[in-house]
Image (cartoon, helix red, strand yellow):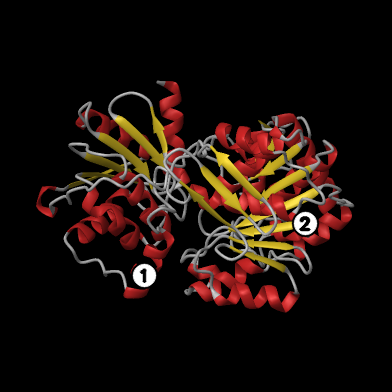
Amino acid sequence: MSIPTPDNTATLQTWLSYLESLHRTSIDLGLERIRVVAAKLNLALPYVKITVGGTNGKGSTCAMLEAILLASGYKTGTYTSPHLVDFNERIRVNGEFASDAQIIEQFHRIEQARGETTLSYFEYTTLAALMLFEQEKMDVAVLEVGLGGRLDAVNLVDADCAIITSVDIDHTEYLGDTREKIGLEKAHIFRPGQPAICADPVPPQSIIDYAAQIKADLWLFGKDFNYSGDRQQWAYGGRGQRRSSMAYPSLRGANQLLNASAALAALEALRPKLVVPQQAVRIGLSQVQLPGRLQILAGTPTIILDVAHNPHAAAALGQNLDAMGYFPHTHAVVGMLNDKDIASVVGKLAHRVDRWYCASLPGPRGMSGQELANAVNKVVAGTAPQLSMQEKSREVRRAEPGEHEASNRPGVRAQPVAPVEASSVSVSSFDDPVQAFTAARKQATDNDRILVFGSFSTVGPVLQELGRA
């Protein structure tokens, strides 16, 4: 059913519903359409632009860059996706969510300019963010790449610096089924002659080769930048800059020092354009916040929210859970999309979870709670495929002792956790994440922990429900 074209008096929700109906498919990669409309809008982008791609760690890296740049006094725009609760989370101006009126104004301008060219939801919102940052005269924009890189709408932008945080298997139907194929797709956010930061400790050769092919200025973790630390503080070392005696980032979780190092490498590479004092780095990293990424809520039982939805992220989440110490029982509220590697994701956490609460997610990609419960039962019963030796090796290298501890502190060791016996595990299904979470809270004692994970569409509704409590 077609939705009438809104005007600039319509609500933001009306506009978003219209955008969802506008294009024939929700995911339609390619830059042809957005380039046509950007040209009609005379999009200039007269600010410093940093693009951030990768399988995991993009949101954390964007949040750290934003916090440091704001502490440095720069007018900073940040564009990320997807959102947890409100669409406005995607577009931030000087650390604040863009208002409905600001977003609607850009939507109206795009609608007037696009003519017969249809845009996907993500293309439309990407243009809106870029236009708002131009209108608000931002000094710098931090832009999270949505899916892959080569054909993602954000790749419309010729970035002054591009970051790849990590490369692992996800979105195989669009990006390929190997790290080499996926790495090549992501490497296309690099630009000739511009800094190209790769924070993956074991980068696919395709990234290195593509950077050499286009003559990008490639910075590799372990070669061009690195970090070190002890129980109290950490230090960053780059090509020509060292930042020492820093407190650990306020973001919890494995690999946050890796993400912080990537952010600092980008800022070092941009020194001719951006001056970032050491005190701004300290303030930014101490104040950065990012809901839904190993977010641990105060009170009892302990509640952990994490949007982990692929094997790499689930493995890091498992390390983080181990580092939290002893809990009598772990209750996992999980909802996932049907195009994810569910067996591998669940397999990373199966021996840590006593009770599973599987929730249905809405939309054509959402998996039903019963289907998910069936998949969980198979993993718990030991029928899921084991990791290959190559995958095991890669995980070990990504979490070297003294580098990627869940607490961020290299001297702190993860606590040994006894595996959960399969015979004692319970699995149940629910109509939605809030219903599943409500059941978990009824079952959990004050000494237990509740983990909510698997998708933004799982964590978001629970976070919203907790906000109402």
How far across and down, in percent of the image, does residue 401 sit? 37, 56
Visible residue check, residue 23: yes
Q: Is residue 192 left or right of residue 17?
A: right
Where residue 394 appears, as percent x and y from the top left, is 40, 68
Q: Nearer the viewer, mark 1 or mark 2?
A: 1
Q: Secondary structure at mark 2?
A: loop
Task: Provide residue 374's location: percent of width, then percent of height.
Answer: 24, 56
Q: Residue furthest top?
A: 469
Amino acid type at mark 1: Ser
- Disc 2 marks which amino acid? Asp
Vertical relation: 307 (above or below) 184 = above
Q: Residues within 10 Å of mark 1 (few under 14, many from 20)?
A: few
Q: Is residue 390 left or right of residue 261?
A: left
Going from N to C along the chain, the mark reached first, 1 or 2, is 2
Contact? badges 1 and 2 (CB < 8 Å): no
Image quadrant where residue 190 sits:
bottom right
The correct choice, above or below, for 363 with respect to 73 in the image is: below
- Residues under labels 1 and 2: Cα distance? 34 Å
The 10 Å Cα crowd at callout 2, few under 14, some 14 to 19, many 20 or more, is: many
Please name the residue shown 59% across and 44% down the image. 244
- Which residue has dot 2 on it? 160
Q: State the residue position of label 1.
A: 393
- Between 284 and 87, the residue placed more toward the observer is 284
